[in-house]
Image (cartoon, helix red, strand yellow):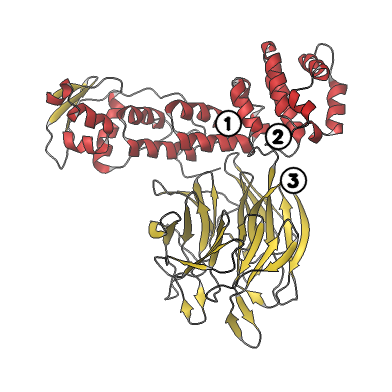
Amino acid sequence: MASQQKEGESSEVNILPSPVAQTKPVELEDDTLPDTVLRVEAEAFFVNRKRLADLSPYFRALFFGGGKESTKRDIVIKGVHEEQFRILMEFTKTLKLPLNRQNVLGILEAADFLQLEKARLLCCKFLERELHLSNCLGMMAYAWQLGCLELYAAARDVALTHLPAIASDEDFLYLPKESVADLLASDELFITREDMAFEVTLRWATFDPSREDDFMELIGLVRPESLSLPYLTELLTRLKGSDPRAKLICRLNNNFPASWNAGRSLPRGRSRELLFMIGGPHDVDAQPLYQFNPRSSRWQSCAPFERRNLTQYSVAAVEENVVVTGGYFREIGWYSVDWVQMYQCVNQRWVEGPALQKSRHSHCSVGVDDRLYVLGGSMDEGLVDDVEVLVLGSDAWEGASPMVRAVERAAVAHMGSCIYVACGLDENGEVYSGVQRYHLKTDQWDVVSYCPYPRYDLLATELNGALYLFGGQAWRLDVETDEWTLLEEECLDRKFFTGCATTSGQIYLLSQRKLKSAIPNMVLLDPYIDTCTEIDDAIPCPVPVHGCVTIRMIND
């Protein structure tokens, strides 16, 4: 995916450190009086011991750990290059790093060596933004080696959602058996057909003749009952005696894996993600509900949502339920309602839930595990900052700490142990630019960042530890480092959508708004394969704002 970058830079991250440039000695300016000289290769740096000790356990131990360096005022540092050291010493004053694709790995390794955790985090987040199908396997290995767990998890997620594509890359063939097994066994693995898992295993095993025993172990992670007959027929038809796959297939035919003989279900494929959307006009007796399966790219009709003349409600996913809360209802006049309607995906029916404590519309709602959170919005009397929580199965809502700022028509997303509410309209009818963060464990709010392009009716979603906002422009926010990245995609620029959800490692944007109407199109955004595809007439009907959610269904 395109993001802001300098002209001439490569689109891939080289996982080998760049050569280090040599520079002349320089004395760093500092607000605190330097009291020590650190020598790195040919350069001398004048530093303050306490300043560095406050930022790094490495320097704390060096200066105040009781070793021989504790009494010295002229110390030689080995194990790091002077160019990276200079950049990091400047960082200790400004807390800013001039990162690019050529220097990031060298700076990361130096920051890791010197235990400068903030600099290390900035480097890791930079690499997360550079993740791509072409480098995710190398990034996985590199991140594991350095102990960058969040970077490793993000790279692994890319591999899990794009396994058939990365299996055609040469790097995949050199993976150790344990890494291949980890991917095949994961419940997060996304493949449209089980045939792909079989094919990937064959490709890896035939690369090296010594992997015959490994093949028998890995093939046990494939679910034989899900293999298609056309695939097996074509495979056997194409095989010849000289084909290295023929030997493996013959051995498999004579000796099935124990998991196949036992008929045990394997973890992968136990769950699937489905996208649900409510759409159609509000002035009819029933609004259609549809589910979309990314594996088959097909829409399926569900029981409709039967609420005539109800608008500005909020839709959320809680476990295996689609929940509609509140809204603006017209009978004789318009007024806010406290209604709660739940669609039980397993039972395929709508049921009523406990009424909200406060009637509201234009609010946010989001599910976290078995809890539903309703945040902000507007009552008939005006905006509210109230937050309500419902534990699924209970008969009443509970209160939670109020928001920092009351807003309506804001975007919401859950990420990690926090809920994020982005922008919206404030009590004066003006656009609020803040991103409010609710800490689930402590029941506390703060403002974590400010959007560079604030609007109301934005859409928000989470993908691999980053927050994405859509509406006029598309932005990625790395919350831990407060870094905003503009996504320069033509199919997103100056366009507004009404639905947004992350499903199987890709972002789906539904129903583009044009003037006062919405059109039934869909945009598929995959940041890791440079793909932003617009599909006309891709959804059954237009969607109201925030009218779609993703639900993970557990297979029986």
**Residue in the foreground of this view, choosing between 15 and 11:** 15
Say whether disc 2 or disc 1 marks the residue closer to the N-terminus: 1
Left or right: where does residue 151 sit relative to residue 235? left
Q: Which type of secondary structure does the marked residue at label 1 adopt?
A: loop
**In the rendered picture of this protein, how many numbered marks are placed on residues?**
3
**Mark 1 surroundings within 10 Å by alpha-carbon count, few (fewer than 14), some (14 through 19), many (20 or more):** some
Residue bearing mark 2: 266
Circles 3 and 1, Cβ within 8 Å, touching? The answer is no
Of mark 2 and mark 3, the one earlier in the sequence is: 2
Helix, strand or loop at mark 2:
loop
Which kind of residue does numbered mark 1 sit on?
Answer: Ser
For mark 3, what is the residue?
A: 556
How far apart in space, not on screen, are marks 2 and 3 (Cα)? 12 Å
| Percent x, y of residue 437 | 43, 57
Res 191 quadrant in image: top right
Q: Is residue 147 left or right of residue 512?
A: left
Please, is residue 464 above or below residue 455 in the view? above
* Placement of 482 over or under 515, stated as above or below: above
Name the amino acid type tagged 3: Asp
* Residue 167 at least partly seen: yes
Helix, strand or loop at mark 3? loop
Task: Give the CA separation, mark 3 to mark 1.
Answer: 36 Å
Q: Quadrant of the N terminus?
A: top right
Instruction: Estimate the x, y position of residue 469 in percent, counting from the top left.
Output: 52, 55
CB under 8 Å between discs 2 and 1: no
In this figure, which residue is indicated by the disc labeled 1? 134
**Which dot, 3 or 1, sits closer to the camera?**
3
Mark 3 closeness class: few <14, some 14–19, many ≥20 residues within 10 Å: few
Give the amino acid type for the residue marked by disc 2 in the picture. Leu
User: Where residue 48 appears, x then y in whole percent?
Assistant: 16, 35
Identified at 67% across, 11% down, the residue is 210
Q: Nearer the viewer, residue 109 or 55?
A: 55
